Image: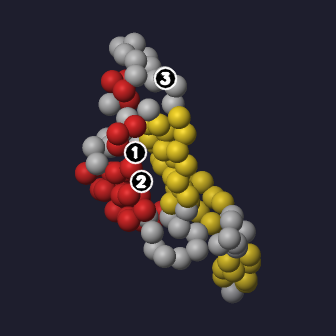
Amino acid sequence: MKKIETIIRPSVFANVRQALALEGIDGLSVTEIAGIGKQEGRVGLFRGNAYTMEFSPKLKLEMVVDDSKVEDIVEALLEYASTGEVGDGKIFILPVEEAIRIRTKERGVVAVG
């Protein structure tokens, strides 16, 4: 099993969610985050005053999947999360040693499905 963590723009979430559903991903954690990278900050206006927004709002998606689904999910993320602009995000893939569903005590891939 693998854990896929991806950081995306909030504006692409609806399309990404639909693409993941088509790949059979019905379990997903979403966290609102803010970050800074090559995109850097931007200047905003509030009541006529300019201010620097150092961090950009992002969403962090986390899912644990069977190894056989990883490439299809990565392809869907690359297609639907990309705007072609700096700040589109990142995908991280980590090994998962074990998963256990607390309620039923099921283990392995069955526990994440």
Q: Position of residue 11 (x, y in %)?
A: 44, 67
Count the numbered circles shown.
3
- CA distance separating discs 3 and 2: 21 Å
Label of residue 98 in the image: 3
The amino acid beneath tag 1 is Val
Q: Position of residue 35 (x, y in %)?
A: 66, 60
The reply to whether dot 3 and dot 1 touch (C-beta < 8 Å) is no
Label of residue 92 in the image: none
The reply to whether dot 2 and dot 1 touch (C-beta < 8 Å) is yes
Crowding at dot 3, Cα within 10 Å, few <14 / some 14-19 / many 20+, comes out as few
Q: Position of residue 63 (x, y in %)?
A: 44, 41
Q: Which residue is mark 2?
A: 74
Instruction: Residue lying at the far bottom in this picture: please name it.
Output: 48
The amino acid beneath tag 3 is Glu
Relative to 33, is 89 above or below? below
Relative to 88, is 108 above or below? above
Q: Position of residue 55 (x, y in %)?
A: 68, 65
| Residue shown at the point (31%, 56%) measured from the top left | 19
Relative to 25, is 97 above or below? above
Seen in the image, is 33 located left or right of residue 79? Answer: right
| Residue shown at the point (50%, 64%) measured from the top left | 9
Quarter of the image for residue 52 reads bottom right
Q: Which element carries disc 3, helix, strand or loop?
A: loop
